[in-house]
Image (cartoon, rainbow, N blue to C red):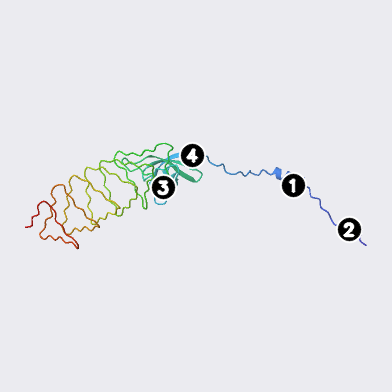
Amino acid sequence: MQSTAAREPLTVAHDDSAQDDLLAAVDLPSIEAPPRRAPSLETGVVRGMASGLLVELGGGPTIARRAKSCLVAPDAGDRVLCAKDGDQVFVLAVLEGEAGATTRIVAEGDLKVQATGRLGLGAGDQIEISAAREVGLFAGKLQIRAQAAAAAIEELGLVGRSLEAHLQKAVVVAERMEVRADRLVQRAKQAFRFIEALEQVRAGVFDLRAEGLAAVRGENTIVAARTLAKLDGEQVKIG
């Protein structure tokens, strides 16, 4: 016959304080995150531009990106100021480049220059404006002053309410010219027309007047009228 004490389950007591004392006795090294290096500035030289900017810094060649505020595009051989922020390197400014080289202002995407007052654009030699698609000028008043101007335009469309031009000399050379107007008035002290082949005038009413002499001359001259042909003068000479 088994005793009651033998049938009771064996209970083992766990002492959490003993486990904490054991862990405290073991000297484990503390695990800390590596400190983040503060951003630093460094100068370098651009060595290549094949896939991004390859800048030669103190630690060797490094791929860098041009900062948004750095509008001057660096070229190979330029000395630049870089900012190192972790694994990223940004070109902040172009310090110096090759003497006489062209300085290019390049922006990714759209670029808008705006001033609350006047905006002036000047150059000692030449100003060029080029666009692959369109150039637009919008202003309340447009003024253009130049000693000489040349324009080469394949197609020109001009829409306006009035046009006034003061010229000392105007020369127009065209293969074909058409003028359409409800009313056309020409005033000149002297007018000369030289037509090599044919000139035709078709009008509802044709009135030709001369204060002095009116002469019509030709190898063959024909005056024809459907209803009435009249010659009137103090003297009429034929032949």
Residue 119 to residue 3: above or below:
above
Horizontally, is 154 left or right of 22 in the view?
left
Q: CA distance from mark 4 to mark 1?
A: 47 Å
Of the two numbered discs 4 and 3 on the same chain, state the one appearing first in sequence. 4
Inspect the image, locate mark 2, and give the three-letter code of the amino acid beneath it.
Ala
Question: On residue 40, which mark appears?
Answer: 4
Name the quadrant containing residue 229: bottom left
Q: Residue at x 44, y 39 (%)?
A: 42
Dot 3, crowdedness within 10 Å: few (<14), some or many (≥20)? many
Residue 85 lies, in percent from the top left, at 50, 43
Q: CA distance from mark 2 to mark 1?
A: 30 Å
Name the quadrant containing residue 128: top left
Inspect the image, locate mark 3, and give the three-letter code of the amino acid beneath it.
Leu
Horizontally, is 212 left or right of 126 in the view?
left
Tag 1 residue: 19
Q: Nearer the viewer, mark 2 or mark 4?
A: 4
Dot 1, crowdedness within 10 Å: few (<14), some or many (≥20)? few
